[in-house]
Image (spheres, rainbow, N blue to C red):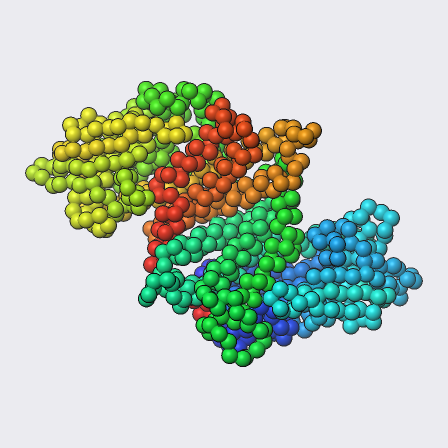
Amino acid sequence: MPSQTPDSDAEFALQVRAFLRDKLPADMARRGLTDVHPSREDQLGITALLAGAGWSVPNWPVEYGGPGWSAQRRMLFEEELMLAGAPPNNIQGVSLVGPVVYTFGTEAQKARYLAPIREGREFWAQGFSEPGSGSDLASLRTRAVLDGDGPDAVYVVNGQKIWTSDAFMADMLFTLVRTDPLVKAQRGISFLLIALNSPGVTVRPIQSIDEGESLCEVFFDDVRVPVANLIGEEGRGWDYAKFLLGTERVGVAEVPRNKRNLATLATMAAQAPSGTPGISLYADQVFRSRIARLEIDLLALEAAAVQTLAIDDQSPLTPSALKIHGTELMQAILGLQVETLGGHAGAFYPHDTAAPSPGPDHAPGVTAEYLFRRCMTILGGSNEIQKNIIAKLLFSGQQPSLPTRSEDQLMLQQSAERCAADYRDTPWSDRADGDPARARKRWQKLADTGLLGLGIAEEIGGYGGSDQDLAVLCETLGGVTEPLGSCAIAPGLLLARSAWAIDRQRAVIQALVSGEQVVAFAHAEAGSAGQCAAAMTACRAQPKAGGFTLNGAKCAVAGGPIADAFIVSARSAGQPGDASGLSLFWLPRNTPGLTCLNYRSVDGQVLADLQLDAVALGEDALLSPPDHALPAIEHALDLLTTMACADAVGTMDQLLTLTRDYLQTRQQFGAPLASFQALQHRVAEMYGELALSRALVQRAVAALAGDPAPRALLAAAAKSRTGRAGFFVGSQAVQLHGGIGMTQACSVGGHFKHLHMFEASWGNSQYQSQRFARLTDATPRPKTGD
């Protein structure tokens, strides 16, 4: 047995990895990576192997043999097992019926069943589904009639179960049966344990579309089951089934398996030729971008799963969304794996054969896995059923639980909500004319709340506060089109990191916080989306005696028309793309040679393009150490991008609420729109996109104070994922509002345009996914089986 459990998660992962490297048989690992339908021997074998370390039942309490790990550690453990190639354990025994037995079973049942499950000596199957019932468990018809009384009584079971995974190699079946047909459907159901070698039980395997076998039909013909095999009370089987289905609240997301499949996909794509000679599919920019999108979606899925584990909330709202996105992600990853096979993707590879096969060595099993995993969006409550669950909860008024916020953050949220409400009450005509004078008044109103000083250190005139505080502010103000990022957040960071004396920093910050002076960060340049990248700056700062001469242009400077001064990035040495040679300059608006073209965005923001023609600046205009501004600019861009994502999440939240409320009140064909299932599913999909984006953005916020590499990676991931989600949520909100959603008077259109502006700012989703791929490929990738 391994030594004591390490304190840190990283050390724990290394301990598990070392154990698997030393103990997991190579042939078992090979089969675990390739077998579509794992054998009984391998599934029980991995459980027995882990039992020797006390790790075979990671989700069980210590008193029943569990290791006492946190939910986060259990997730890490499953991930290490997957990456090492370990076959799955008997999930129906370890994860499903085991917890039911130790929670509701008698002492005799615990003594009889728990040890064989824990030690890998007994194999279980689950008998819930029935022909014609699908996910509607309450409609089951398998009957169990009590015969006799006392301890010698038996239930006589007749009926049929279907889609019963691995029943043909199982010893025991836990199943739902109807014991009272006269009461309400859910109340007449009981939970029975049935030995599959009992007389009258017939198990018939069903060949699935991959031509393999794991699904089964089970028939009961006067099967006599001891009354001692009843779990809990007769008639409470529905309650025990709901408990069983809720024990693994994030396992349905399939995060570990998706990680392994993605690692396998990367390896396969690196070995597969593209249409260009000498270039692999992985090196092909289009294919690599498709992989990057899946990697980003997996990051969001994992972030939402971890967040769900951390919240003490038993609502199925987010777990249902996890099931939908996790299973659809799995199918998308496997679809790309098949693509890497090229012309051999359609070849049939028989199961369990060592015969020579066409294509690359890794081809056998790939298409079969792709075909078989179509079941993932069906089993465990189909994804359509999960959407029904989400919609029912949303339309009943339930809200998802969010991470705990401090008392100060709740007060900040309330203050920001008042500002947002006041802004939203302002007529569109007063916000959308692009008038700098009106925009300046709105900015001063925001400054009067004190919110502009948030996130800026107190010693230089700010009000302090963490990145998490800033994110709360930005999310709460979601949809408010004031240039908070460019005119407060970015200048605050850049001035704090500047080479200026602290007195000068403090004077500017105090004027900024009070609204007396507006400062805008001018960095983006016209051209491709990559022009918002820090190192791609082309604007020139030619050194001269006593200062610099600036030439170039900046585009779409948020808040530019109301700015009194700009913080401008320019290249004082080198060429675009070089890591060195960048500097930051303080540029007053009235400087000769500076021309501002003022305009407004589609969502009512005031913007400006700057033209710099031989703009002469003194040495005191230099904000950064000469030629070494890149780290500060990259930090500012990651901060701006992440906070813009928080704002987009808040905007999506507004759209979800507006759409839900509209569908509940708008009548059509004599019924509220909310009663139509197709529209309910649209709202459920909107919620899923919001939930995963919110979780990923929160992870990106947490990374802002850390090392630059993960900070940049998560900022890129959050921007890419949230940009795609924003378009989906916004477009669905307009669609579901019908014609009124197309009118200027409806706030839904304004929010949709705000999300469009978000997508266009600081690198769109495509650019950010490519950036994410570059950053990911610069980091060594863990290999499957290492």
Name the residue at the bottom extreme.
Answer: 355
Query: Which residue is at 32% across, 19% downward?
Result: 437
Q: Quadrant of residue 586?
A: top left
Instruction: Give above or below for 373 relative to 757.
Output: below
Percent position of residue 254, x then y: 55, 57
Percent position of residue 48, x then y: 61, 73
Percent position of residue 233, x then y: 81, 55
Relative side of 578 to 470, left or right? left
Query: Which residue is at 54% across, 80% downward?
Result: 355
Name the residue at the right extreme.
Answer: 148
Query: Which residue is at 31% across, 46% downward?
Result: 530
Answer yes or no: is residue 708 visible. yes
Instruction: Give above or below for 12 relative to 298.
Output: below
Query: Which residue is at 68% across, 55% downward?
Result: 244
Instruction: Give above or below for 26 relative to 419.
Output: below
In the rendered view of the protein, which quadrant contains the C terminus?
Answer: bottom left
Give 257 or 678, whichever is nearer the viewer. 678
Relative side of 445 to 499, left or right? right
